[in-house]
Amino acid sequence: MGETLPGFDKPVPGRLGDILRPLGVIMRLVSPDIEYIFTELVKLQWSERLAGKAESTDVRLLQAVEKCVDTQQRQSLIPEKR
């Protein structure tokens, strides 16, 4: 029991990385030969979280504002007919 735990960096940033880091340490201790499965699972979970954030109401609102500004800028470049 006097062994030092292996190092394991946070697999992803933020709170999720804080939660998953100890699981990565355990995975490295128990089955280092299949640690890559844990790493791939974490990456998949992280990408799904990012995709979910991209669909949030705040992001959709910002995209709508950006679209309006782009439309307004394009219309100001078109000369008025007289």
Image: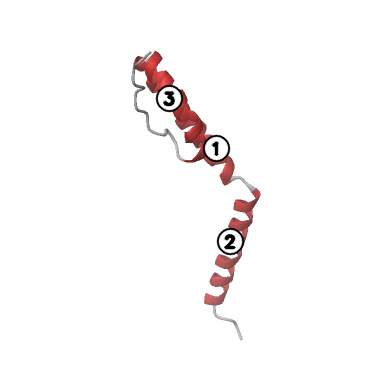
Question: How far across and how far down the image is residue 41, in percent?
Answer: 47, 26
Question: How far across and how far down the image is residue 50, in percent?
Answer: 53, 41
Please state which amino acid type lies under the numbered disc 2. Answer: Lys
Please state which amino acid type lies under the numbered disc 3. Answer: Gly
Q: Which residue is the site of mark 3?
A: 24
Distance between mark 2 and mark 1 Cα atoms: 25 Å
Identify the secondary structure beneath mark 3: helix
Identify the secondary structure beneath mark 1: helix
Please report the residue visible at 41 percent of the width from the left and 23 percent of the height from the top. 25
Front-lying residue, 38 or 73: 38
Q: In the rendered image, which quarter contains the N terminus?
A: top left
Question: How far across and how far down the image is residue 75, in percent?
Answer: 57, 73
User: Left or right: where does residue 66 sit relative to residue 33?
Assistant: right
Q: Which residue is the site of mark 2?
A: 67
Name above or below for residue 31 compared with residue 71.
Answer: above
Please report the residue visible at 38 percent of the width from the left and 20 percent of the height from the top. 28
User: Left or right: where does residue 69 sit relative to residue 33?
Assistant: right
For residue 49, which numbered disc appears in the image? 1
- Residue occupying the far front of the picture: 2
Mark closer to the observer (2, 1): 1
Please report the residue visible at 64 percent of the width from the left and 56 percent of the height from the top. 61
Distance between mark 2 and mark 3 Cα atoms: 42 Å
Mark closer to the observer (2, 3): 3
- Residue occupying the far right of the picture: 57
Q: How is the image coloured?
A: secondary structure
Front-lying residue, 60 or 42: 42
